[in-house]
Image (tube, helix red, strand yellow):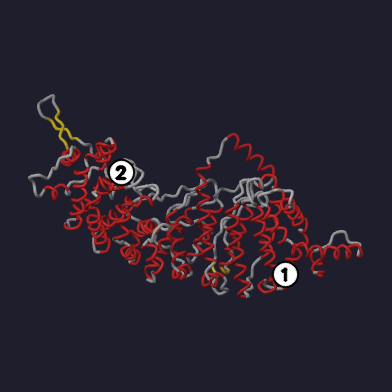
Amino acid sequence: MSAINEEGEGLSSPRRPTHSPTLLRKGIPGERKPLKEKLITYYEQLFKGEDPSQGNPRFWEEFFLLKVNIQYFQTTMSEMKTWELISLKKSLSLLFVQCCTTLQLDDNVIRNINALQTLCVLLRSTFDKKLSDSSFDVIDVVIGFDSAECQMRNLVEALNKFLVHDYPASLKNLCLRLLLVMLTAMDNISQNMLLEYVMMNSVFETIMHLLSVPDLRDQHGYDAVVVLTLLVNYRKYEAANPYVIKLSVLDDEIALHGLGSVVSSVLTEYNKKYVPPTEEPVGIFGHISSFVSNMLVPVDTSQTRVKIDMAVLLVLYEAIHLNRNFITVLTHTKSLSNPVTPTTPNPAIDRSLPLPSSPTTPAGKQPTGLPQPTNLLGTFFTFSSIILQNIKDDSSVTHARLCLVIITCIVEDQFANSFLHDPNMTFPVTLHRASLLHRKPTKDGLSHVRPLACSLLDLMVEFMISHMAKNFKLDLYRKCLGVVHRMLCYQKRCKIRLNYNWKELWVGLLNLLKFFAASEEHLLPKLNIFAVAIEVVKIFNLFITYGDTFLPNPSTYDELYYELIRMQKIFEDVHSMAKRYSSPDAHSEFHSSASQLAANLVNVRSISAHFHPRINAWSASHHVTSITPEQVYTHV
């Protein structure tokens, strides 16, 4: 993640034309003399190791009234050799100290803006030189270890002052920009020792203030959330992170709802802009034609890839994982009005969303049939359906994994589960579905108004049936099945009879077992599919043993037995596969998992063994070759 682009435009507020280092004026006819910018002259003195303020006590007041020449500063720093940069330690630390002094003591907005921009370009340019694998050398060169603690304390105090009190939005934006420059200076945030000073001098309360005030949240909410996300993840598993502690005990309802509002607005913006791929030809000939066309004109998959905002997903995970009070934000019901998307005048991190190749929607106009969910949970489920159907590469797998981890945290919470299953809290949730060969693509994906638990089960089933491929995502499937298992355990424990089409879930689980049996030769050398199959069978055993306590009616329980009897061959094939790998002669690394799977199949196989002879005997006595489901139900 980079807070500034190569030319450094990310540092200034509105984008302005870049000034040339020199101007030309006419002198003697036929001769043109270069006239340098005043600030360039000062930069040159600093880069020569000189102190341009000698003999001029008001020098720095004049210096910070001049607009920062970002391009010249960055170019000069990038062209320096490492030893040259280290030799300028005295000049660079002088510049850093004067920037901090100006921010702390001077209330002139122009000087403060230029001081912040100077700090941004100074830190970014120095970190880009990669003086060493750690940030110690950068701190020593730019600040000096002897004065680093004092100067960083003064700097953070000044940033808090500008962000909390009544200062222009452009100044607040630059304060957040500077924090982002410091936070994103190194690829591994935990190696950035500069952040130790931000740990000692907190900006947490300031960020919460920005999220609590609606006007500030609309202008700076996004960058504030990104800053919070990065700070929470700094060495979170290595040492006591004060931001983790403060977020976990935060009980300020206004601040928590402000955080949820920013997350909801960003996710809603993506949901509105996403347009599903155009409908593909249906039928075998249509798919053959499409295949031949793609051979002649390759499809640009980069255009159909959905890029998401990892920072927003991370802060949503951290808030749910760390703070029990945030669950009330997830369940808060909002009006159907469109939320205001928090923006900054010139965001430090580009969060533009490349859209699929299908036609886009004009700004401010919603796609037909895409109503906005009325709470953060519904919005997140819609967003997750997009992510889970666009798994193309390693980064998209990471995004999908994080979505499933967040959902797991949700279904592990008692209050969230009660809200999901509350029959009086119903919402329409749009779930995007994949275009599969055996079904037409869904044009609008709009579900009926029903409890959110139904939408979540639909989301898990959709993922389950649409990613059975040779490149099998075992980790994602285990998380998906874990979500389903936790929901069923809650329903069983609380005796909740959810009015849901359970057959869709059963068929999806059966098809997954069938896929394992058919793909054994390809999958088993690389993946322990027995671990996933165990999760599937556990879910079936939960239905068999406790289904009468949470299935909506007896007929649904009969349907379960019918599906188990009808698909006897799938269970027998999986059992045979488990037996082969659990035998002493197999010498398989999956011996333990295969043995456990074979043991877990006892219930399902005993049902088939019990009912099949009875059904066959009845068919023979009545001379019926094809028995109907209703006739099977009579035996069940």
Which residue is rendered at x = 63% and y = 75% of the image? 495
Mark 2 vs mark 1: which is more N-terminal? 2
Quadrant where the C terminus is found in the figure: bottom right
- In the image, residue 142 lies at what x, y percent? 25, 46
Question: Residue 457 occupies which quadrant of the picture?
Answer: bottom right
- Report the amino acid beneath label 2: Gly
Q: Is residue 458 visible?
A: yes
Q: Residue at x 11, y 25 (%)?
A: 29
User: What residue is disc 1 on?
Assistant: 557
- Contact (Cβ within 8 Å) of mark 2 with mark 1: no
Q: Position of residue 164 (x, y in %)?
A: 27, 64
| Residue 346, placed above or below residue 86 | below
Examine the rendering and report whether any part of residue 346 can be seen.
no
Task: Tell which of 352 and 620 is nearer to you.
Answer: 620
- Residue 367 in the figure: left or right of residue 235: right
Query: Could you say which is closer to the camera, residue 187 or residue 258?
Result: 187
The answer to whether 83 is drawn above or below residue 601 in the figure is: above
* Alpha carbons under labels 2 and 1: distance apart: 64 Å
Q: Nearer the viewer, residue 248 or 456?
A: 248
The secondary structure type at the circle numbered 1 is: helix
Residue type (three-letter) at the residue carrying disc 1: Tyr
Name the residue that disc number 2 marks: 8
Label 1 Cα crowd, 10 Å radius (few <14 / some 14-19 / many 20+):
some
Is 576 above or below relative to 487? above
Q: Position of residue 463 (x, y in %)?
A: 60, 55
